[in-house]
C-alpha cells in the first residue's frame, strides 16, 4: 500500500480542483468502491488523498430548463428517497432500491458509481437510458460528456486524472414515457448483477418512439442496445416485434464467462428478460 | 392459605443467557482479548497446490525491525496432526493444497508481520496435481502422500442382508449418480488463538475457539511433546462452530511454536479471506445409489458407492461415512444394504466436519430416489415413505435400536399441515417448462439424538455447588458455541433445585476448572451434558432435603425444592428458605457445603468392526416439506414455505429450539440454492462474502415448525438432540420440489439459477 503523503478535505470546489490539477490525487467520496479495491490491492493510493465530501455544491438536486441535475455527492439512499428525483426520473429511484445494502447506499454516491465505471454499476444502466450527461470540471475548465461516450472499458472512462465528476444532468422524460429497470442476480439483495436491463420509450397508439435500451454486465462497459432500439423504434409493439427485439438484444450483447454467470446464460437472460420487459409494457 | 404455584421451566421460552451481551455488541470475543507483551502471528501460505519445496529464504524477513521470530519446518519438531497424522503444521518437503503453511512470523504489530511475510521467498518445483477424486484413484495417478500410494485416505465398507437377493425380489430398480458440492460454515467469528507460556513454570495457556477442549488438550500435548497437565485451554465466547472447530488445525500449533520461540504471548487471528481459504469445508461427494422396491411399495435393497473428495489432508470429517451409512441402512426399513465409501486425496482444500456430518449428502441421494421409486411404482410419494418408515421398537440391520421413534408422526404432521399429497398431485399435473411453476417436495431424516459412542467415552462431567445465598454454579465440560447449551443446562438444574434462572451461573470454558467432556458434536450436548447436570443437581437436592428433614422433623420424601424454598411436597407450603438451610449446614457443627459431582455416560455401545451396534442412546427424526416457485425464464428458485416436523423428544427451551431449527433450515437452504466454493486448479475462486452467497433476509421463507414430543426415556426430561437435524432435509426436499414443478430432476448441487436454467434447457452435463 502506497503511503498517503497529504490528506485534503476542502470545503469548496475550486480548492478541490486545484488539488487535483497535478493528477496525483485519489478522490474519496463514499469509499464503498475505493476501500475494498485498496484493501484487495487492486488500487493503490496516490500521494494525495482528496476527500470531496465537504463540498456542499456537489450535493444539490435541481430541476430547470427541462433538465434535472444531480450532484455527484448525492447518495444512493437520497436517489431512492428524494421526492424530486422520484417524480422527475422514477427509473433512477427504482434502480437505487436494488443497489447493494442500506449501509452501502448510505455511503455510496452517484458520482462514485459513475467514476468506478463497473460494467455492472447499478445506476449506470438507468443513466444510459435516461440519456444523462456526465458533468466534469478541472482547474482549466468544464465539459459535459454523454453517458454513452463516457466509458472506455471496465473501470475506465474518458475522465482525466485532473478532472472531477461534479454531477449528472438528465433531460426530463417526455409525457407518455414508459421506463423499466431489471436487475438479475442470484439473490434479491446484496448482489452484483449477472445482467441488468434498462428501457425507456414514448408509447403512443401502440408504437414506441425515442426508444432507449441499455444493458449492464454483458460487455466491458454498460452499453446502449442500438440494434435493439432500431428494431423497436416506430414499429407496432406486438408479439412478433418483441421476439425480434429479444433476439436482436441477445445477439448484440458481448458478455463473458465469469464467476457470476456464463456468457451463454447471460445471453439467455437478456433474451428472456427483455421479452418480459416489453410484454409488460404492452400489457399496461 | 393457598400455596404458591411454581410453574415448570421445561418447555418455556427462555432467552439465551448470553443474548443480552451479544445483542448489545458487548461480548468480548478472542479478537477483543489482548495480553501484555503480546505479539502478532501470521502465516505464509503456499502459492502452489502440489509442489516440492526447494528452498525457503527468510533472511530478509528476520532482518526487518520489529520481527521477533520467523519459523519454517526446519525450526520445529515434525509432528503431523489430524486423524491420519498426515498434516505437519509447517510444511517442509512438499505442499499439497492451497492452505499449506510454509512459514510463520511473529512481530510487534500486525503491519510489521504483514510486511515480513512479503519478504519471504520460497522456491517450488511443481508436481503433477490432482483435482478430481475420480482421477486420484486411477492406476498410475500421482501420489499425494507417500504413505498412501493409492491416494485413499480412508475407506469404509458396510453390509447387512444380501443385496443380490434384494435385487431379485425387486419389481422396480432405480440407479442414479448424485454430485454434491463444497460449502463452508461461515462462522461469524473467524478462527483464532492466543498462545501464552507462563514465563517461569513454562505452563501453556491457549485461548482457543475449539469446540472440543479436552481432546484438543490431549492432541496439543502430543504435538508439542508436553505433559497434558501443563496445558490449559480457555475458550472466550465462540462466534459459531457448526463442526468447523472439531479438529486441531495447523495455525494452532504454529501460534504455540511462535510463542515458544519468542517467549511472548502470540495472537493469531484469521482474516475473513483466510477463513474462507484455510478453514474446513463440507465434503464434496459423488454418490452412486441403486435401490429397489416391490410392487406393493416395500423397499428391497440399496447399494451405495460414495467417493469423497478429501482434499490434501485428513480431518475428522473424513469419518462422515459413519453417519452416511446410518441413513442408507436405517432411515427406512431396508432388508438388504451394501455400502462402500472412499475418501481420497486431491490437491483441493481439505474437507472437515460440518453440521449434519455427511447426512445432508446421504439424504439428498436417498430422498430423491424415494420420489423416483414412488413414481415408478405409481404410488403416492408420501404413502410410499409411510409404508417403509421406521417405528419405535425397531432394531435395524445396523443394530440401531429405536426406543422412541416419531418418524411416522413427523411424516403425517408435515404432510398434513402442508397438504403435501394433494399439492404434489395437482402441481405435478400442471408441471411444465414455461413461465413460473410451483412444486412441493418432501424429505425426511434420521440422525443421532443421544450422543454417538465414537471415542472410548461419550460422557460429560458436571461439578455443582451452592453458595450461602442459594446461588448455583454449574461447572460443565460442555462448551457453549452459540447453540444455547448453557441456557438449557441452567434450566434443567433450576427445575431440579427449584431456583430461578437468575440464581445460576454456568462455567464452561476452562479445562483447569471444568470436568471432562468429549466435545460439541453429534447433536449430543443437551442430551449428555443435560443428563450429567441433572444428576449433579439431584445429588445436591438429596443432600439439602436430608438436612432439611432433620430440621423440620419431616421425612426427606415429604419435602421438595420450589421457588427458592424448601417446601412440603404435598401442597407446596413453605418450610424454610433454601438459603437459610444452606447457611445452617455451612455454619452448624456439621460444617458442610453443598457441592456435588456427576459423570454421565450414555447407555450406548461402540460399533463392531462391521459398523454395527446401537451407537446412540436416542435417535432424532424429522420430515420437512417445501414449496418452491421456479421461474423458467431465469432458473431462479424461490423457497416459499417450509413445513418442518421434528421428533425432539421433548421441548426444553421453546425459543432455543425454534432458533436451532430456523437457523438449520436457512443453512440447508443456502446449501441447496446458492452457497458454493468453486475451486479452479486447486484455488478457491470466491473467498469473500461478496461472492460466496449466503441466504439473506428477503429469501428466508415462511416456516411452520412443529415439535413431535416422544418423551425419550433416557433423555433429559425426555429430550433428544436436535442441533444438526434441521439442516439435513432441505436440499433433498428442494430437489423434489423442482422436479414436481418442472418435471426436471437435478442430481447435482447447488440449485443456482444458471444450473437450474441449464437443466431446464437440457444443457446440464
Image (tube, helix red, strand yellow):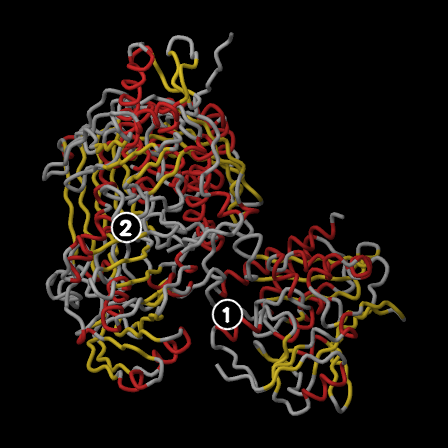
SS at badge 2: loop
Q: Is residue B129 depicted above or below B321 in this figure?
A: below
Residue B397 visible from this viewpoint? yes
* Residue at the spot of label 2: B246
Point out which mark residue A148 bears.
none
Nearest the camera: B425 or B648? B648
Image quadrant where one finds the C terminus of chain B: bottom left
Q: Is residue B625 visible?
A: no
Mark 1 against mark 2, which lies toward the viewer? 2
Q: Is residue A202 above or below residue B325?
A: below
Give left or right: position of A29 versus B685: right
The residue indicated by pointer 1 is A256
Mark 1 and mark 2: Cα distance apart in space: 41 Å
| Residue at image coords 66%, 83% | A158
Q: Secondary structure at mark 1?
A: loop
Seen from this angle, which residue lies furthest front? B589
Which of B455 and B485 lies nearest the eye of the viewer?
A: B485
Q: Quadrant of residue B138?
A: bottom left
* Image-quadrant location for residue B466: top left
* Quadrant of the image occupied by residue B527: top left
Amino acid at each position: 500500500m502506497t503511503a498517503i503523503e497529504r490528506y485534503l478535505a476542502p470545503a469548496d470546489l475550486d480548492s478541490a480542483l486545484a488539488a487535483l490539477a497535478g493528477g496525483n490525487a485519489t478522490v474519496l467520496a463514499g469509499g464503498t468502491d475505493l476501500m475494498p479495491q485498496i484493501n484487495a490491492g487492486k488500487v493503490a493510493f496516490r500521494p494525495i488523498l482528496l476527500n470531496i465530501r465537504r463540498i456542499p455544491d456537489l450535493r444539490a438536486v435541481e430541476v430547470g430548463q427541462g433538465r434535472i441535475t444531480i450532484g455527484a455527492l448525492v447518495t444512493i439512499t437520497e436517489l431512492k428517497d428524494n421526492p424530486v428525483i422520484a417524480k422527475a426520473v422514477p427509473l433512477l429511484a427504482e434502480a437505487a432500491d436494488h443497489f447493494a445494502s442500506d449501509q452501502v447506499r448510505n455511503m455510496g454516491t452517484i458520482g462514485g458509481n459513475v467514476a468506478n465505471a463497473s460494467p455492472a454499476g447499478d445506476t449506470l444502466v438507468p443513466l444510459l437510458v435516461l440519456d444523462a450527461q456526465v458533468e466534469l470540471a478541472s482547474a482549466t475548465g468544464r465539459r459535459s460528456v454523454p453517458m454513452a461516450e463516457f466509458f472506455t472499458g471496465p473501470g475506465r472512462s474518458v475522465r482525466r486524472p485532473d478532472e472531477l465528476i461534479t454531477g449528472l444532468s438528465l433531460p426530463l422524460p417526455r409525457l407518455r414515457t414508459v421506463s423499466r429497470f431489471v436487475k438479475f442476480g442470484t439473490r434479491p439483495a446484496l448482489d452484483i448483477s449477472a445482467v441488468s436491463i434498462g428501457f425507456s420509450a414514448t408509447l403512443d397508439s401502440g408504437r414506441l418512439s425515442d426508444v432507449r435500451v441499455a444493458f449492464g454486465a454483458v460487455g466491458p462497459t454498460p452499453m446502449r442496445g442500438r440494434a435493439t432500439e432500431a428494431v423497436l423504434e416506430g414499429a407496432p409493439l406486438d408479439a412478433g416485434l418483441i421476439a425480434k427485439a429479444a433476439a436482436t438484444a441477445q445477439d448484440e450483447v458481448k458478455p463473458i464467462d465469469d464467476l457470476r454467470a456464463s456468457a451463454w446464460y447471460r445471453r439467455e437472460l437478456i433474451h428472456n428478460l427483455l421479452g418480459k420487459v416489453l410484454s409488460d409494457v404492452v400489457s399496461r | 392459605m393457598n400455596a404458591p404455584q411454581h410453574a415448570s421451566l421445561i418447555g418455556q421460552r427462555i432467552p439465551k443467557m448470553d443474548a443480552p451481551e451479544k445483542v448489545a455488541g458487548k461480548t468480548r470475543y478472542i479478537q477483543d482479548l489482548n495480553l501484555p507483551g503480546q505479539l502478532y502471528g501470521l502465516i505464509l501460505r503456499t502459492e502452489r497446490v502440489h509442489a516440492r519445496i526447494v528452498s525457503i529464504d527468510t533472511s530478509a524477513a528476520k532482518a526487518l525491525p520489529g520481527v521477533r521470530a520467523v519459523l519454517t519446518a526446519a525450526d520445529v519438531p515434525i509432528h503431523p496432526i489430524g486423524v491420519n497424522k498426515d498434516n505437519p503444521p509447517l510444511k517442509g518437503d512438499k505442499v499439497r493444497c492451497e492452505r499449506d503453511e510454509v512459514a510463520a512470523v511473529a512481530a510487534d504489530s500486525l503491519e510489521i508481520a504483514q510486511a515480513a511475510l512479503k519478504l519471504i521467498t520460497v522456491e517450488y518445483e511443481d508436481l503433477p496435481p490432482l483435482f478430481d477424486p475420480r482421477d486420484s484413484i486411477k492406476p498410475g495417478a500421482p501420489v499425494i502422500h507417500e504413505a498412501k500410494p493409492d491416494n485413499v485416505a480412508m475407506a469404509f465398507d458396510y453390509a447387512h442382508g444380501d443385496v443380490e437377493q434384494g435385487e431379485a425380489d425387486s419389481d422396480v430398480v432405480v440407479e442414479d449418480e448424485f454430485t454434491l458440492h463444497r460449502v463452508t460454515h461461515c462462522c461469524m467469528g473467524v478462527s483464532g488463538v492466543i498462545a501464552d507460556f507462563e514465563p517461569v513454570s513454562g505452563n501453556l495457556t491457549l485461548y482457543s475457539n475449539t469446540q472440543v477442549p479436552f481432546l484438543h488438550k490431549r492432541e496439543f500435548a502430543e504435538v508439542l511433546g508436553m505433559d497434558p497437565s501443563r496445558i490449559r485451554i480457555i475458550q472466550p465466547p465462540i462466534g459459531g462452530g457448526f463442526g468447523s472447530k472439531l479438529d486441531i488445525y495447523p495455525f494452532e500449533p504454529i501460534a504455540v511454536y511462535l510463542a515458544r520461540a519468542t517467549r511472548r504471548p502470540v495472537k493469531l487471528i484469521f482474516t475473513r479471506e483466510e477463513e474462507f481459504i484455510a478453514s474446513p469445508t463440507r465434503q464434496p461427494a459423488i454418490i452412486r445409489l441403486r435401490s429397489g422396491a416391490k410392487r406393493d411399495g416395500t423397499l428391497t435393497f440399496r447399494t451405495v458407492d460414495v467417493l469423497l473428495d478429501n482434499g490434501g489432508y485428513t480431518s475428522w470429517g473424513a469419518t462422515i461415512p459413519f453417519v452416511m451409512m446410518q441413513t442408507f441402512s436405517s432411515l427406512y426399513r431396508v432388508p438388504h444394504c451394501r455400502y462402500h465409501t472412499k475418501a481420497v486425496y486431491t490437491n483441493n482444500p481439505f474437507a472437515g466436519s460440518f453440521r449434519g456430518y455427511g447426512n445432508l449428502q446421504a439424504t439428498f441421494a436417498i430422498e430423491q430416489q424415494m420420489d423416483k421409486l414412488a413414481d415408478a411404482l405409481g404410488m403416492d410419494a408420501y404413502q410410499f415413505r409411510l409404508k417403509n418408515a421406521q417405528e419405535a421398537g425397531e432394531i435395524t440391520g445396523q443394530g440401531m435400536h429405536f426406543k422412541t421413534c416419531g418418524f411416522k408422526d413427523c411424516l403425517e404432521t408435515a404432510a398434513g399441515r402442508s397438504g403435501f399429497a394433494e399439492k404434489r398431485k395437482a402441481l405435478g399435473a400442471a408441471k411444465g417448462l414455461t413461465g413460473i411453476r410451483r412444486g412441493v417436495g418432501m424429505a425426511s431424516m434420521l440422525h443421532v439424538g443421544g450422543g454417538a459412542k465414537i471415542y472410548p467415552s461419550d460422557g460429560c462431567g458436571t461439578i455443582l455447588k451452592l453458595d450461602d445465598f442459594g446461588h448455583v454454579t454449574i461447572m460443565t465440560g460442555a462448551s457453549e458455541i452459540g447453540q444455547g447449551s448453557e441456557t438449557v443446562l441452567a434450566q434443567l438444574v433450576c427445575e431440579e433445585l427449584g431456583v430461578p434462572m437468575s440464581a445460576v451461573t454456568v462455567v464452561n470454558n476452562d479445562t483447569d476448572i471444568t470436568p471432562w467432556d468429549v466435545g460439541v458434536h453429534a447433536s449430543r450436548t443437551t442430551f449428555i451434558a443435560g443428563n450429567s447436570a441433572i444428576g449433579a443437581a439431584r445429588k445436591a437436592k438429596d443432600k439439602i432435603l436430608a438436612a432439611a428433614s432433620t430440621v423440620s422433623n419431616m421425612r426427606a420424601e415429604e419435602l421438595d425444592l420450589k421457588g427458592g424454598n424448601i417446601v412440603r411436597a404435598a401442597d407446596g407450603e413453605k418450610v424454610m428458605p433454601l438459603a437459610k438451610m444452606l447457611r445452617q449446614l455451612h455454619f452448624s457443627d456439621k460444617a458442610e457445603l453443598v457441592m456435588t459431582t456427576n459423570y454421565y455416560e450414555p447407555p450406548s455401545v461402540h460399533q463392531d468392526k462391521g459398523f454395527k451396534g446401537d451407537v446412540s442412546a436416542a435417535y432424532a427424526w424429522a420430515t420437512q416439506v417445501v414449496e418452491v416457485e421456479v421461474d423458467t425464464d431465469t432458473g431462479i428458485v424461490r423457497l416459499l414455505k417450509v413445513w418442518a416436523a421434528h421428533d425432539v423428544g421433548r421441548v426444553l427451551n421453546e425459543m432455543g429450539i425454534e432458533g436451532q431449527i430456523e437457523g438449520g433450515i436457512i443453512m440447508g437452504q443456502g446449501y441447496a440454492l446458492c452457497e458454493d466454493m468453486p475451486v479452479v486448479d486447486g484455488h478457491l475462486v470466491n473467498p469473500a462474502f461478496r461472492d460466496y452467497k449466503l441466504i439473506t433476509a428477503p429469501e428466508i421463507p415462511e416456516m411452520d415448525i412443529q415439535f413431535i414430543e416422544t418423551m425419550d426415556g433416557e433423555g433429559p426430561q425426555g429430550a433428544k438432540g436436535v442441533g444438526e437435524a434441521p439442516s439435513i432435509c432441505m436440499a433433498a426436499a428442494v430437489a423434489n420440489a423442482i422436479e414436481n414443478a418442472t418435471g426436471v430432476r437435478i442430481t447435482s448441487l447447488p440449485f443456482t439459477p444458471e444450473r437450474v436454467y441449464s437443466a431446464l434447457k437440457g444443457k446440464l452435463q
